[in-house]
Amino acid sequence: MDSYLEAAERMRPQLEAIWRKLHEMPEPAFEEKRTAGFIADQLRRAGFRVREGVAGTGVVAQLEPVDAAAEGGVAEEVADWKAAAGQAAGKEAGDAAGRSAAPVLALRADMDALPHNVGGQQVFVHSCGHDAHCAMVMGAGMLLARECPAARGRLRLLFQPAEEAGLGAQRMLEAGAVDGVDVLIGIHLRPAAECRLGQATPCVMHAGGRTLRYSLHGRPAHTGRPHLGANVADALALATLAANSVKPDPALPGTVNVIFVSTGDGPTGVIPDHGGMAVNIRAETDDAADELRQRVHSAVTSAAGSVGVEAMLEGVKEMPAPSYHPDAVALARQAIEKVLGEENVIEAISTPGCEDFHWYSRRTPGIKAAYIGLGADLKPGLHHPDAAFDLRTLVYGTAILAQAAADYFRRQPEE
Ligand SMILES: [Zn+2]
Ligand SMILES: [Zn+2]
């Protein structure tokens, strides 16, 4: 049999066509309708049981165990499922995705694009490479569907919405998309500065993130009589300095940044009495992020309080730090080694970026997670509207994901 790299290489025109199609229909968080429709259609044709509309615009596709000798094979399975899915309309996605004793390995891709201002116009661009992640997960699924190694388990493909909004993974969890999953593997292109084309890591160490949003409440007054008011603009200036004075431990990488302040645009003769502020915190561990959160909160509230303004915490957006399982990391590492060679395995990459992928393991005790960082010669950088990468990456990513899944299923006892 061909290696997965050879098989993915032969698939390259198809992978590039899939990627191009996705690249040309960038859609923002929770609006990935055309993207989801295209993915679902392609995977149904490849023999997957597919469920759309999971967590809004998410797609869950599963390859069921088939008896290779049985008449009908994959096609018959799909026909059965379609009938069952019709009867079970309205049931939870997790049920449709199938729960059973057979081990389930899931590959996860994210689907959303980012808004950018280009030439004064807001446009959406796949500047985080999520189009590539979808193409590689689809490609791996198609390779595995052809040879049906899932006879010893179930392969599930997850296409989640709204990663950039930090909400998609949680909604997928609530919809049951990872119910019954034993091993979960995510993948992301890495910027050229972190990892070259042809290299990869089974362990991307993202930061844990916390974004604190405040509303500020002062007291209005005439600007000719400011001593009678409590000025929210003053409070914001002091709170910004105070938040920026919270120093992360240099031994543990971390950052604190004020990312938003506003008093709105009121009349020029009135001391502003309301406003808003947001502070973003990143740290290598959740404990370190939580400690910074406490210190930032105390700095902001006391700085605002010093001029008579109350800073009220309106909400905290949390992105967990990674919690990987050594078995899943070893599986991904071995797949990278088989596809790219031992010399091209990077043991771990630390990045200040956050990923909502880590909600899956945070909320699902027992799930074994790993997250592959894939060299792509991506320039000038992620989230840049001109971000571009070498399309050969699609071949490598597809081969690595297919290899990892196949290795996992081969280790399972026959059903
Ligand atoms: Zn991103
Ligand atoms: Zn991303």
Image (spheres, helix red, strand yellow):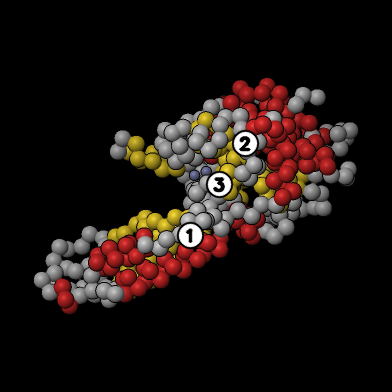
Residue placed most toward the observer, 284 or 37: 284
- From this viewpoint, is residue 402 visible? no
| Image quarter (top left, top right, bottom left or bottom right) of the N terminus | top right
Is 240 displayed left or right of 87 in the figure?
left
Is 360 displayed left or right of 410 in the figure?
left
Q: Residue at x 39, y 38 (%)?
A: 123
Residue 400 is situated, as x and y percent measured from the top left of the image, at: 68, 34
Q: Residue at x 74, y 51 (%)?
A: 182
Dot 3 surroundings within 10 Å: few (below 14), some, or many (20 or more)?
few
Residue placed most toward the observer, 27 or 249: 249
- Is label 1 or label 2 in front? 1
Residue 391 is situated, as x and y percent measured from the top left of the image, at: 55, 27
In this figure, which residue is indicated by the disc labeled 2?
A: 200
First in sequence: mark 2 or mark 3?
Answer: 2
In this figure, which residue is indicated by the disc labeled 3?
A: 350
Marks 3 and 1 sit apart, C-alpha to C-alpha, by 16 Å
Residue placed most toward the observer, 35 or 104: 104
As drawn, 395 above or below 413: above
Residue 307 is situated, as x and y percent measured from the top left of the image, at: 26, 74
Marks 2 and 3 sit apart, C-alpha to C-alpha, by 13 Å
Q: Which mark is residue 297?
A: none
Q: Secondary structure at mark 1?
A: loop
In this figure, which residue is indicated by the disc labeled 1?
A: 249
Amino acid type indicated by mark 2: Ala
Is 128 displayed left or right of 411 in the figure?
left
